[in-house]
Structure formats: structure tokens, C-alpha cells
């Protein structure tokens, strides 16, 4: 089995890479792992993923990264799997409020690969296999720093977390019919721009613990 592990930055999967170098577990199982560090954001991740898929078709793609949470109900360092993504900031801010591409009728809400405006992971077996809480996520180009925007997104998309690459993974893998899963660890709360409050080290540690457990279970 070929597994592609994808992240926006190398820092997010460094402990996983170090673990692979220090274990001989993979010598005894049929699992080959490739890494892809895409750079931050949907444009970078779409390009990198498509470029990789042109030369190699993995049996499973695992995106691993940190994320912001909308509610303190999700604790910093908690690890979740994403069941669906929405592209939250693709639209227009008008006098009477925010309209996304679906509100603007530029995209039909159920046009493949969208289902009710969302990019839903159809590989439910893989999601269950993570044994992680399943959440709804939004993907943004700009980290949401304003409380008002955070409230707008949370209300409109009923999202628990936000990140900057997930929708690209969902769109590419659904369209290419490649099994995938997205695992995220909570590093900060959305709307809070003080990076000193981000629990980077702890969230990366928690993320990698789950990533190792999941990949070794494949
Ligand atoms: O500075 C570091 O040491 C460091 C270590 C690991 C990761 C980073 C990043 O900057 C990762 C950027 C990545 O994180 C996602 N993210 C995290 N929080 C949010 C958020 O509140 N809103 C949107 N995205 C978030 C995002 O996917 C970025 O690609 C730094």
C-alpha cells in the first residue's frame, strides 16, 4: 500500500518523519510512505497535490496539520478528523452581508463534487478508522482574526474548525477518486490573533501521535 502524507509546513509532520527514521516497523508490513509539503494555502496545496498525482497514484492520502477552533468546547491540542469542508471566503462582502459563490449562483449547490455546498469526505471507513471526533471545517485564504467574521463563518457554515488547505485536499481527492482523510489538531482559537497564545508545540505533538497511530494501523 502506498500512503501519501501531506502537510502545509514541514514543522507540522516533523515528529512523524523522525519517528519513521527511528522505527523498523515498516520493514515488516506492506506500507510505503511518501511525503508532500505543499506550502500554506489552497492554491499551493492544489498545485502540489495535482503535480504529485500526475506521477503517482497513492492508495490513501492523509493530510495532517494544525487548525483554529471556533469554540472552547474543542480544547487546544485536541485532534479531530474532518468529515466535510467548505470554501468560506470565496465570495463577495456586500452591504447586506456576505455572499459565497453558491449564494451568488455562480456554482450549483449540488454540482459534483459539492453536496449541499460542502466537500464531504465519502470515504467513511477511513474516517471511522481514525477513531477521532469528526468535525465540519472551513478553508480560508486569510486566517480569521476578527471576532465578527468568526461569528459569521461559524453561523453560516456550522464549522467547528478552520484551516487553509483542507478544501483543496477534499476537492482534488473526491474528483480523482482517491481515498483520503484529513487530521487536524487545535493550535489556537479563531479570532484570536496573538500567536503567543497558540499552542504550536503541544498541538504538533498531539497531531503526530495520532498520525503515527493511524498510519501504522493501515
Ligand atoms: O511557527 C511555527 O513553529 C509553526 C509550527 C507549525 C505550524 C505553523 C504554521 O504556521 C502552520 C500554518 C497552518 O496552520 C493552519 N492554521 C492554524 N490555525 C489556523 C487558523 O486559526 N485559521 C486558519 N488556518 C490555521 C493553516 O492550515 C496553515 O496552513 C507554524
Image (tube, rainbow, N blue to C red):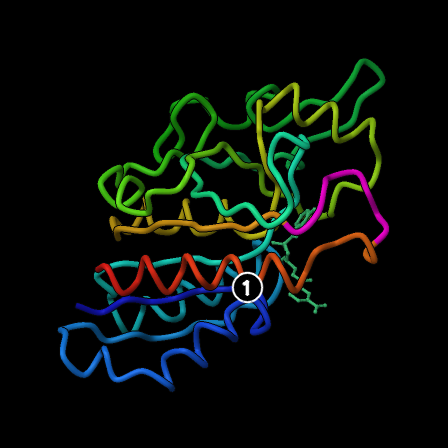
Residue found at x 68% / y 27%: 153
Residue underneath mark 1: 205
Picture coordinates of residue 53, whole percent (x, y): 32, 66
Q: Is residue 193 magenta?
A: yes
Image height of 97 relative to 59, above or below: above
Question: Is residue 74 left or right of 166 when viewed as pictured?
Answer: right
Q: Quick one: SS at disc 1?
A: helix
Residue found at x 26% / y 37%: 124
Image height of 173 relative to 7, above or below: above
Image height of 181 relative to 98, above or below: below
Picture coordinates of residue 79, whole percent (x, y): 50, 47
Residue found at x 32% / y 46%: 175
Picture coordinates of residue 66, whole percent (x, y): 59, 54
- Please tell me whether the stretch drawn in magenta is mainly helix, strand or loop: loop
Image height of 65 relative to 119, above or below: below
**Ligand 1 is in which quadrant of the figure?**
bottom right
Q: Which residues are magenta?
A: 187-194
Picture coordinates of residue 182, whole percent (x, y): 42, 49
- The residue lying toward the viewer, choosing from 176 and 205, is 205
Residue behind label 1 places its C-beta within 8 angstroms of ligand 1: no
Q: Quadrant of the N terminus?
A: bottom left
Q: Quadrant of residue 81?
A: top left
Question: Is residue 7 left or right of 153 when viewed as pictured?
Answer: left
Badge 1: how crowded within 10 Å, few (<14), some, or many (20+)? Answer: some
Q: Quadrant of the C terminus?
A: bottom left
Amino acid at each position: 500500500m502506498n500512503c501519501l502524507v501531506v502537510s502545509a509546513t514541514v514543522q507540522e509532520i516533523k515528529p512523524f518523519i523522525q519517528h519513521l527514521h527511528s522505527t523498523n516497523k515498516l520493514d515488516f508490513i506492506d506500507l510505503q510512505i511518501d511525503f508532500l509539503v505543499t506550502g500554506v494555502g489552497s492554491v499551493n496545496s492544489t498545485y502540489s497535490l495535482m503535480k504529485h498525482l500526475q506521477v503517482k497514484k497513492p492508495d490513501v492520502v492523509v493530510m495532517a496539520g494544525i487548525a483554529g477552533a471556533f469554540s472552547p468546547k474543542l480544547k487546544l491540542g485536541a485532534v479531530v478528523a474532518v468529515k466535510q469542508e467548505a470554501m468560506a471566503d470565496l465570495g463577495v462582502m456586500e452591504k447586506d452581508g456576505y455572499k459565497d459563490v453558491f449564494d451568488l449562483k455562480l456554482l450549483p449547490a449540488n454540482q459534483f463534487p459539492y453536496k449541499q455546498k460542502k466537500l464531504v469526505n465519502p470515504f467513511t471507513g477511513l474516517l471511522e478508522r481514525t477513531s477521532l471526533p469528526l468535525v465540519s471545517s472551513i478553508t480560508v485564504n486569510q486566517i480569521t482574526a476578527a471576532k465578527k467574521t468568526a461569528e459569521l463563518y461559524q453561523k453560516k457554515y456550522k464549522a467547528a474548525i478552520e484551516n487553509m488547505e483542507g478544501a483543496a485536499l477534499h476537492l482534488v481527492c473526491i474528483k480523482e477518486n482517491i481515498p483520503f482523510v484529513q487530521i487536524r489538531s487545535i493550535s489556537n482559537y479563531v479570532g484570536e490573533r496573538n500567536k503567543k497564545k497558540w499552542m504550536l508545540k503541544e498541538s504538533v505533538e498531539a497531531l503526530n501521535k495520532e498520525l503515527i497511530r493511524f498510519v501504522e494501523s493501515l
